[in-house]
């Protein structure tokens, strides 16, 4: 199985190109800065910069929304390849091919305006949450719930 799930921020705006031919396909190249969960002693770098590529509708999504600093969740696969550069040397590549890309935070959280439909005031207040992190459900609405 070859499956990758990443969450990180774009290091620069996504670079978009279109393939040649009758049915031109969008191709997006971008790099995600992904924080490591744990830091090893003596390791100064705690972020990995991962090269990614997307095709078709996923690339078109990134053309529209893929701006430097935007936080995304990506699902895809690792793909390796190689080519010969102009000096005649063999260069090996490793990319994550993004099959699904979604926003990982609202525009408010990233410092922009909010057109996502998310309103922080819709969030339950901390006082409505029980000590275990779950929200208390008032008595009498059990019949409205899709599960019992």
Image: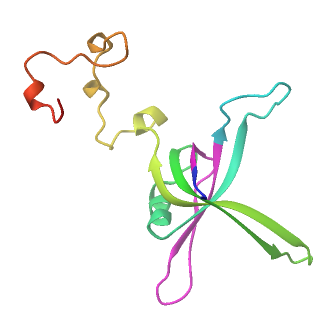
Spot occupied by residue 130 in the image (x, y as percentages of width and height): 31, 11
Identity of the residue drawn at 61% across and 58% down: 2
Residue 9 magenta-highlighted:
yes
Identity of the residue drawn at 29% across and 25% down: 123
Q: Is residue 84 left or right of residue 63?
A: right
Q: Quadrant of the C terminus?
A: top left
Q: Quadrant of the N terminus?
A: bottom right
Residue 11 visible in this rendered orientation of the protein: no
Q: Is residue 58 left or right of residue 6?
A: left
Q: What secondary structure is the magenta-colored segment mainly?
A: strand
Rendered position, 91 above or below 68:
below
The color scheme shown is rainbow
Q: Is residue 91 left or right of residue 142?
A: right
Q: Quadrant of residue 80?
A: bottom right
Which one is in front, 79 or 73? 79
Q: Which residues are magenta?
A: 5-33
Spot occupied by residue 89 in the image (x, y as percentages of width and height): 91, 73
Q: Quadrant of residue 119?
A: top left
Residue 39 visible in this rendered orientation of the protein: yes
Rendered position, 113 above or below 135:
below
Identity of the residue drawn at 58% across and 43% down: 9
Which one is in front, 23 or 133? 133
Which one is in front, 106 or 58? 58
Identity of the residue drawn at 44% across and 67% down: 57
Q: Is residue 83 left or right of residue 6?
A: right
**Number of marks present in the image shown:** 0
- Residue reaching furthest to the bottom: 22
Spot occupied by residue 103 in the image (x, y as percentages of width and height): 45, 46
Residue 98 magenta-highlighted:
no
Spot occupied by residue 132 in the image (x, y as percentages of width and height): 37, 14
Rendered position, 37 above or below 126:
below
């Amino acid at each position: 199985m070859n499956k990758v799930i990443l969450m990180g921020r774009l290091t620069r705006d996504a670079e978009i190109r279109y393939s040649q031919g009758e049915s031109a396909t969008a191709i997006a190249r971008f790099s995600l800065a992904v924080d490591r969960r744990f830091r090893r002693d003596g390791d100064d770098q705690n972020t990995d910069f991962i090269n990614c590529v997307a095709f078709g509708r996923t690339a078109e999504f990134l053309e529209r929304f893929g701006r430097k600093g935007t936080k995304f969740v990506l699902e895809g696969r690792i793909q390796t390849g190689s080519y010969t550069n102009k000096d005649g040397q063999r260069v090996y590549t490793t990319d994550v091919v993004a099959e699904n890309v979604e926003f990982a935070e609202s525009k408010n959280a990233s410092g922009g305006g909010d057109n996502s439909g998310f309103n922080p005031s819709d969030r339950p207040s901390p006082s409505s949450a029980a000590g275990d992190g779950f929200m208390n459900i008032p008595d009498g609405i059990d019949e409205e719930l899709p599960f019992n």
